[in-house]
């Protein structure tokens, strides 16, 4: 049998991976996943914080418009006044946000309206971060706008 025929016969007989090759590939993929996963998970928290800041700034702009149209909201008013007409507002009322979902932070909880504000004189729009509790660091840090 010539060399060409022998190599063709050997190539036909060996078509799959050996168990050792499969184990080596799985171990390599596991190492790569262990290195990359924590970095990606940290980025998700950072992106949610950025989204909370952006959405809070948008709600602060909507609150300024509400203030200009209807005067200062009563102390204790909730962020819902931007979507649902408050009882003390007379005359016509158009919502200042597109839907009730616009009042939610990236973690699915409503932003909090504080009148008067603690950080700002007029009002604060607050999200308590991932843990939903005041204070915290990283993804749990508070977002206060404007």
Image: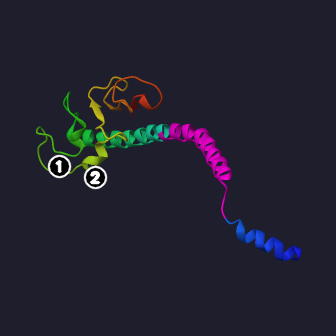
Dot 2, how many residues are within 10 Å of its Cα: few (below 14), some (14-19), or many (20+)? few
Q: Which residues are magenta?
A: 16-44
The image shows residue 135 at horizontal and vertical percentages of 39, 22
- The overriding secondary structure of the stretch rendered in magenta is helix
Nearest the viewer among 120 and 70 is 120
Residue 48 placement: quadrant: top left
Asked whether, in this view, residue 70 is left or right of residue 7, the answer is left
The disc at residue 6 is none
Seen at 83% across and 77% down, the residue is: 5
The residue where tag 1 is placed is 93
Q: Is residue 94 above or below residue 1?
A: above
The residue where tag 2 is placed is 98
Disc 2 and disc 1: Cα gap in Å? Answer: 13 Å
Nearest the viewer among 5 and 126 is 5
The image shows residue 18 at horizontal and vertical percentages of 67, 55
Q: Is residue 25 above or below residue 4?
A: above
Seen at 46% across and 25% down, the residue is: 137
Asked whether, in this view, residue 38 is left or right of residue 113, the answer is right
In the structure shown, which secondary structural element does the residue marked by tag 2 occupy? loop
Total number of numbered discs in the rendering: 2
Nearer to us: label 2 or label 1:
2
Answer whether residue 99 is visible to the viewer in this image.
yes
Seen at 75% across and 69% down, the residue is: 11
The image shows residue 82 at horizontal and vertical percentages of 24, 43
Q: Is residue 116 above or below residue 84?
A: above
Asked whether, in this view, residue 25 is left or right of residue 143, the answer is right
């Amino acid at each position: 049998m010539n060399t060409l025929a022998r190599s063709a016969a050997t190539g036909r007989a060996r078509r799959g991976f050996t168990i050792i090759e499969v184990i080596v590939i799985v171990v390599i993929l596991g190492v790569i996943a262990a290195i990359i996963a924590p970095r990606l998970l940290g980025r998700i928290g950072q992106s949610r914080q950025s989204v909370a800041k952006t959405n809070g700034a948008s709600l602060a702009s909507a609150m300024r418009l509400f203030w200009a149209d209807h005067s200062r909201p009563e102390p204790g008013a909730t962020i819902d006044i931007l979507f649902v007409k408050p009882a003390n507002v007379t005359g016509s009322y158009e919502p200042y946000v597109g839907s009730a979902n616009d009042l939610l932070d990236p973690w699915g909880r409503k932003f909090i309206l504080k009148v008067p504000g603690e950080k700002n004189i007029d009002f604060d729009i607050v999200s308590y971060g991932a843990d939903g509790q005041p204070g915290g660091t990283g993804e749990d840090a508070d977002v206060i706008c404007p």
